[in-house]
Amino acid sequence: MKDTLARATAEGGRIRAIAVVGTALVESARRRHGTFPVATAALGRAMMGAALLAAASLKAPDRLTLRLLGDGPIGAVIADADAEGGVRGYVQNPHVALPIKANGKLDVGRAVGQGNIVLSRSMGDAQPYTTTAPLVSGEIGDDIASYLLTSEQVPSAVALGVLLRRTGTVQSAGGLLLQVLPGGEEFAQELAERVEALGPISSRAVHVAGSDGLLHDLLQGFSDVRVAPPDPLSLRCTCSRGRASRSLLLLGPEALGELIDDGSAELRCHFCGRTYRYGQAQLERLRADAKKAVRP
Ligand SMILES: [Zn+2]
């Protein structure tokens, strides 16, 4: 099953639903970051959540960054997504191990802890627009739903799931966002029951159906169901040597001078792990550019 994102509406647009299947991209992120199981689950849920939020609220070329800033051992969980199916993410402390919960599930809530969920949307070159809400459980799906209700006044159901094999590799990962727009309140109860009946979003059955099949199953029987053909979803980083150089430039001539004294500098992208190296001559050139930028 390929990684995809599908959108649907029903009841004349009063019901809106988005589904994602992201098994391969969450497994790639796990391998890249070497995350332990509870961190894999947290990272995978955050990336699925960011993909859903981006699909619900962005237009290309905008981006959205979801930050879960809790006081748990995992530290910050960061995921970002664009409007064209690109997703990336990382956790501050990937090597966290916690006891399994009584229900057999990974304790993502404890790993994340208490704190805030912070959502930033950047549109072109404008300053990112950021909103913050408290985390309600640290389980990520609940936190996003609560954020959407309190900060954006849209009642939403958010289900996120990452299922791991015994070996810690990702068996399946997916997510679902359901929103009832004004005038559709009468459907809320029925939809909640259907999401419940669907079972865990990470279950194998959900993934056999694919993101569009999942929406067909969920909305069956409602009127005017429209499910768009699914779009591809993939792990994609936007870092580049040009961006790395611009961030070095922002340090200013003085800090660059210190790096020149050190002989070299290395910038590592948190999202993908790629490293950008700068030798003395390259740093000298950057310092010269920084000096030009400082002068009026
Ligand atoms: Zn990168």
Image (spheres, grey):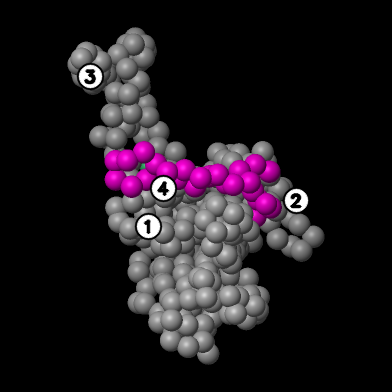
Q: CA distance from mark 1 to mark 4?
A: 8 Å
Examine the structure image and report whether residue 167 is included in the region drawn in magenta: no
For the residues carrying marks 2 and 3, which lies nearer the camera in this image?
3
Quadrant in which the C terminus appears: top left
User: Which residue corresponds to mark 2?
Assistant: 99
Q: Amino acid at mark 1?
A: Leu
Is tag 2's residue or tag 1's residue first in the polypeptide sequence? 1
Q: Determine the residue located farthest toward the right in the rendered image.
A: 102
Q: Is residue 209 visible?
A: no
- Nearest the eye: 37 or 196: 196
Residue 232 % position (x, y): 35, 66
- Nearest the eye: 209 or 97: 209
For the residues carrying marks 4 and 2, which lies nearer the camera in this image?
4
Is tag 1's residue or tag 3's residue first in the polypeptide sequence? 1
For image coordinates 36% across by 54% down, the residue present is 82
Classify mark 1: residues with Cα within 10 Å, few (<14), some (14-19) or many (20+): some
User: Which residue corresponds to mark 1?
Assistant: 58
For image coordinates 22% across by 13% down, the residue present is 295
Is tag 4's residue or tag 2's residue first in the polypeptide sequence? 2
